[in-house]
Image (cartoon, rainbow, N blue to C red):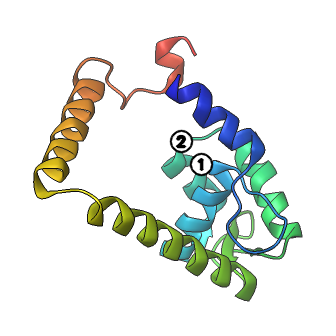
Amino acid sequence: MFFTKLLAVDRRGVKINGKNEKFSFVDVMILRMIGLKDNVSIFDLIYELDVDRGIISTSISKLTKGKYIEKKRSKQDGRVFMLNLTEDGKFLFDKLHEQEKDLVGFLLESSTINEQKAVLKFLSRVNQTMVGKYDVTKSNDDFGI
């Protein structure tokens, strides 16, 4: 049920700024990664996010057309494109970061210390289960997906 709702949200898109634009989770992750690291190659995105090249390419095209990121050829290797945030992209990154902080702050301020500990314990257990039982370090091909 959770994953179905998550996919529905992703299909509808997420609003970050005041404009009518909507972004997929992949768009948001690309913006975050470029904003945090700056001068990121497309290969780095594919490797770090573990997402199909076609999906990354579609998001990069969308973000480039929206003037949120810019592509430039690497000075070291002309075959490689490096990605950076534009001024609009930096503004969007800051808005995204602000929304994340607000959400975390809301969740933490409205819960007790014991509730926070319970959530951390639950998340730790989920992480251990996913790594131990399902070995989430494997690629999706290993699961027949």
Instruction: In the rendered structure, find residue 77 and report the number of the disc placed on it.
Output: none
Asked whether 6 or 61 is in front, the reply is 6
Label 1 vs label 2: CA separation? 5 Å
Instruction: Locate residue 18, reporting x and y percent.
Output: 76, 75
Q: Could you tell me which residue is drawn at 55 percent across and 75 percent down? A: 35
The reply, left or right, for residue 31 in relation to residue 131 is: right
The number of callouts visible is 2
| As drawn, 64 above or below 49 | below
Q: Dot 2, how many residues are within 10 Å of its Cα: few (below 14), some (14-19), or many (20+)?
A: few
Looking at the picture, tell me which residue is in the foreground, 5 or 36.
Answer: 5
Circle 2 is placed at which residue position?
A: 50
Q: Quadrant of residue 128?
A: top left
Could you tell me residue 140's position as x and y percent? Answer: 52, 23
Q: Which residue reaches farthest top? A: 144
In the rendered structure, the answer to whether residue 66 lies left or right of residue 47 reads right
Snapshot quadrant of residue 86: bottom right
Residue 137 picture location, percent across and down: 36, 32
Along the line of sight, which residue is nearer the eye, 17 or 108? Answer: 108
Q: Are marks 1 and 2 in contact (CB under 8 Å)?
A: yes
Q: Which mark is residue 46?
A: 1
Q: What element carries label 1?
A: helix
Q: Is mark 2 on a helix, strand or loop?
A: loop
Which image quarter: residue 54?
Answer: top right
Q: What residue type is labelled 1?
A: Ile
Position of 80 with respect to 118 (left or right) is right
- Location of the C terminus (image quadrant): top right
